[in-house]
Image (cartoon, rainbow, N blue to C red):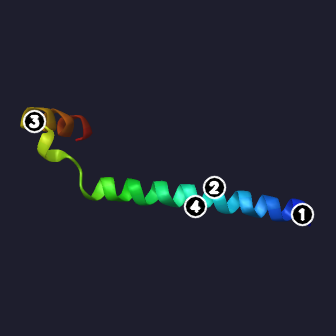
């Protein structure tokens, strides 16, 4: 029983860290630093994905 509780707590800790990371990644994706990218670099990057 104690081992199950410890595993559950470990899962909750891991989930919490993952959730924090996911919120950070989503915020970063919503507001990229595109103002710091040169037009020529952005154009070349776009060509690679077309």
- As helix, strand or loop, the secondary structure at mark 3 comes to loop
- As helix, strand or loop, the secondary structure at mark 1 comes to helix
Image-based side of 37 in relation to 26, left or right:
left
Question: Would you say the residues marked 2 and 1 are in contact, meaning their CB atoms lie under 8 Å apart?
Answer: no
Expressed as whole percent of the image width and height from the top left, the position of residue 26 reads 37, 58
The residue identified by callout 3 is 38
Expressed as whole percent of the image width and height from the top left, the position of residue 32 reads 23, 50
Measure how far apart labels 4 and 1 are at the Cα level: 21 Å
The residue identified by callout 1 is 2
Image-based side of 17 in relation to 32, left or right:
right
Mark nearer the N terminus (2 vs 1): 1
Question: Would you say the residues marked 4 and 2 are in contact, meaning their CB atoms lie under 8 Å apart?
Answer: yes
For the point 56% across and 55% down, the residue is: 17
Front: mark 3 or 1 = 1
Measure how far apart labels 2 and 1 are at the Cα level: 18 Å
For the point 92% across and 67% down, the residue is: 1
- As helix, strand or loop, the secondary structure at mark 4 comes to helix
Measure how far apart labels 4 and 2 are at the Cα level: 5 Å
The residue identified by callout 4 is 16
Image-based side of 40 in relation to 33, left or right:
left
Image-based side of 21 in relation to 40, left or right:
right
Residue 14, disc: 2
For the point 82% across and 65% down, the residue is: 5
């Amino acid at each position: 029983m104690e081992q199950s509780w410890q595993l559950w707590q470990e899962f909750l800790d891991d989930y919490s860290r993952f959730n924090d990371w996911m919120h950070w990644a989503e915020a970063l994706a919503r507001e990229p630093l595109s103002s710091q990218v040169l037009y020529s670099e952005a154009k070349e990057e776009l060509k690679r994905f077309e």
